[in-house]
Structure formats: C-alpha cells, structure tokens
Image (cartoon, helix red, strand yellow):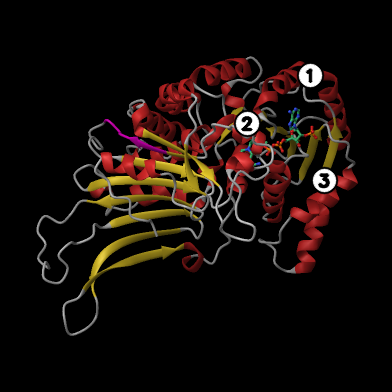
Amino acid sequence: MSAQLAIIIVGASGDLAQRKLLPALFSLYAQKLLPAEFRVVGFARTPRTDESVRARTAEKLTCRYTPEPQVCAELMARFLARCHYVVGDYGSRDAFLDLADRLRQLTGSLGGGCLFYLAIPPAIFLDTARALGDAGLVSCAAPGDPWTRVVIEKPFGRDRASSDQLAAELARVFIDEQTYRIDHYLGKEVLQNLLVLRFANRIFEPLWNRTYVRDVHIVWKEDLGVGTRAGYFDDYGIVRDVMQNHLMQMLALTAMEPPASFAAQAIRNEKVRVLQAVPPLRPEDLALGQYAAAERGVGGRPAYRAEPGIPPGSCTATYAAAMLRVENERWRGVPFFVECGKALDGPLAAIRLRFRDVPANLFVNALPNLPPNELVIRVQPDEAIFYRVINKVPGLNLRLEPSELNLRYRTAFPEVIPEAYETLLLDVIKGDKSLFIRADELAAAWDIFDAALHAVEAQSEAPEPYPYGSRGPAGRAQLAARHGLELEPMA
Ligand SMILES: NC(=O)c1ccc[n+]([C@@H]2O[C@H](COP(=O)([O-])OP(=O)(O)OC[C@H]3O[C@@H](n4cnc5c(N)ncnc54)[C@H](OP(=O)(O)O)[C@@H]3O)[C@@H](O)[C@H]2O)c1
C-alpha cells in the first residue's frame, strides 16, 4: 500500500458518498487500514466548506469498530480533519485543475496513490471522465509508481451496445487496469464466503450439479418503494438496476466452475465462462410487475405511479422474475429462477438450492411427501447459511419434520461484519480486482437480457400491477408453474 493516499469522491454531496462511502472510509481508518498520510477530498457543485462537510459527515459515522466513546470521538476528530471539499463543475477541466492544486497544498505532492470514486449519476460519467483526463489527473502509472484508480458504479449503460460504447469512451481516459467497476453486492460477506463454502468443503461440491440439485432460486427484494431515487429508477427499472448486475453476480458465484486459483484473473475467468453459458432470456420467460397502492400501514402505501417524481403513466417495472438456464454439463436442465422487486412482502437477498427427492421414501407412513432438502444462503438481512433436513421429532413415536442446520452469522461470529463498501474500498486501495466486474463479464451479463429488454420496451405495455407488500404479480407464479416449479417461501 502506498504511504500516501488521496481519495477523491466526485459527487460528494450525494447519497452514496454521505451514506456509504465516508462511513466506510472511517471504518477503515478506525481499523488502521488507511495509510498514515491519507486525505479524503469531496468534489461537487453544491457550495460547501470543509467545516460544513465535516459536520454533515460526523452525523453518519459510527463507532462499530471502536465502541469506547472517548476513543471513537478522538478517531472521528482525526479522520474528519483529513476530509476536505472542493466546489466545481463535473465537466470542467479547470475545476479539476483546482482540485489538483488543493491536493498539492494538502499533501505536498501528488506522489502517492490517487483513487477517484465517481459517485455521480451515469449521465455525467463521460463528461466527468474526460475532464479528469484533460486535467491530467489519470495518468497511467508503471508498476511500483504512484497509481491512479477510478471506481465507477453501476449502471454501466442501458444495454449491451450502450455499455460497450461507454466502456470504449472511458477507455480513452482510463486503461482497464485502472478501472474498478463496482457491484457492491460482491462486497457482502456471505457472497464472499460462497466460494469458500463451495470449494473449501468436500461435502458440497459432489452435490452441486444437475444430478442432485432440482432448482436454484435467487431472490432480492425490498419492502419499500422507490424512495428518493425516483428519477434514476424510473429511467432504468428493476431489470437494469438489480437483475442484470446483483442477481447475475449471485448466479455466477453459485454456478461457476472451480477457478484454477483464488487469484482475481482466475475467478473472473470462471464467472465469465458461466455467464456466457446462460442463453439469452426469452421474453416469455420474463414476468414483470409494478407495485400498486395498498391499504397497509398508516395512510396506506402509494402506488409506484403516485410516488413523488414518477410520471403517472410510467411503464417501468418494479418487479421482475426470469427463468434462466445454464447450458453446461453441470447445470443443463436445472431451472434458475431469479427474481427481484421493490415494495414486496419483506427485505431479503438469498440463494436457495433445492435438492432432488430421495428415490424411495422409507417413512411413507410418517410423512408421505418428504419435502426436498434445501441449502439457503441468506445474504441479508441476518446473514445465515442453513440446510433444511428431515429429522425425527424426539418422542416415542415416529414423527418427521423439516428442521434446520443453521449457521447464523450474528451468533456464530462475534466479529463486526464489514459493510460491503468497506471491503471494496480496501480492495481498490490494495489493487485487488477479484470483486470487481471485468469488461467481458459485464458484456456477458448484458447479453442475457438485451433481447428481452428490447422486446418488452418495443411493446411499451404497462407491467402487471401487484399490491404493495405482496409477493409480486400473478405472473410470477404462472412463470414458475410453466416450468414445473413450486414457489415455497424462503425462510
Ligand atoms: N445511493 C446508493 O445507494 C447507490 C447504490 C448503488 C449505486 N449507486 C450509484 O452511485 C452513483 C451515485 O449515486 P447517488 O445516489 O449518490 O447519486 P445522487 O445523489 O443522485 O448524485 C450524486 C451527486 O451528483 C450530482 N448530480 C446529481 N444529478 C446531477 C445531474 N443531473 N447533473 C450533474 N450533477 C448531478 C449532485 O451533486 P451536486 O449537485 O452537488 O454537484 C449529487 O449530490 C450513481 O451512479 C448511482 O447509480 C448509488
């Protein structure tokens, strides 16, 4: 790690910077994971001073790693003294030259690592990148030299063509080696553990295939509506916001072959390979929905179209379910049911593998239909890994019941579970790209959805409504049923 580090958050007045990035940087600082000579410089158009930014930031920092109040307060004061703010326009070379001057004043040089985090809406990525390049701030370094790295947030384009175009334009400014495409889901502790679970344990790998697995269900859902990100969400919709990225990363980690090593290159090679083995989604295998009003809660819940900032006639989907296949020797014939949505019946992100039935039920008198074994990897909330097995209920007669072999992170591990952005920011600082999306991986994920998205958009039909707080539209169960899948709730 360089002795000197400048972290420049472009778009520092925004939600991501305030709510996630600055608290994550403080957590790294509290754990002594930042170099002694670091500076955090926020850049945005909103006029603010160093002092006002520090006061705002202080409200968002937590003492998770240093619960002792006095120690935490001292650490916060020292961290905040290293946070600064520069006002400027994103497309302005001169504004970034001012930023460079400020950095020189603060650090005495620009000699260490330089991390630019583009925490800005996608529409201004390119102008910002070009202005950074014109100001000479993203020079490519030789190995061992001071480095410049640039983090960009999804969404990366709207489809395969626009994503390729964005990548090509960005490549004029930053080389691929410098570019860190973040999908914060990959920083989640339970997902990082998935490769360990699969490949450091002998018991899972022999079962992890079409011979034993009946179906795979990957879910991401929120119990809240669109919230404050209405403009962005309405433009992109749930497939681009969640399915094409978070869910495909979860699928890739679940379905990939063992990598040759734990090196970034080897892991990403296998992720690309498995995504390329997923045929393009057929439009008829995609079910879309949009939340409608519900009477639940004080004053009820609004329909998507009645949310502030959403056009009353919006056809944007807030729910999507897709039936995918992985056409390779390991998975051929196993349905991968992936679904995501807002305003559903609870927050949950999880992967469930359901196993095939036992060939003969010896216990038919006690339990005529043995429920299938399940392995559930729950990413959030309440991180856990559990196996559902059939068990004899203690007693003098033979009574069978599904029970759980349960690894709950909160009870099993006394350690603080890191936030995804802590893990990912530290990896960028270390230059470890294992958890970042490679260009060909991004292209492979778009290829799965491109045709279906274009077909749906050509029809411009309103998605099927579902009540706020429900499990989704009726089309969800119909899609599953067409593929012979029963959708039991996931614990
Ligand atoms: N927020 C999240 O939880 C989250 C999660 C995943 C990914 N992301 C991605 O992270 C990036 C930043 O997200 P965010 O929620 O922090 O965004 P944001 O709050 O909407 O925007 C960040 C800042 O960019 C500037 N900005 C906004 N709209 C602009 C426009 N039309 N033209 C010029 N400047 C504009 C504003 O700063 P000034 O007006 O002060 O210049 C704003 O404070 C986005 O790419 C988003 O998709 C965010």
Q: Which residues are magenta?
A: 321-327
Task: Identify the residue at horizontal 60%, vertical 35% (top origin).
Answer: 233
Q: Secondary structure at mark 1?
A: loop
> Which quarter of the figure has residue 137?
top right
Magenta residue check for 323: yes
Closest to the observer, 62 or 146: 62
Q: Which residue type does callout 3 highlight? A: Arg
Q: Quadrant of ligand 1?
A: top right
Q: Which quadrant holds the C terminus?
A: bottom left
Residue under circle 1? 135
Q: Is residue 108 visible?
A: no
Q: Do callouts 3 and 2 mark residues in contact (Cβ within 8 Å)? A: no
Q: Nearer the viewer, mark 2 or mark 1?
A: 2
Q: Sequence order check: which comes first, mark 1 or mark 3?
A: 3
Q: Which residue is mark 3?
A: 82
Query: Which residue is painted at 52% across and 39% down in the image?
Result: 318
CB contact under 8 Å: marks 2 and 1: no
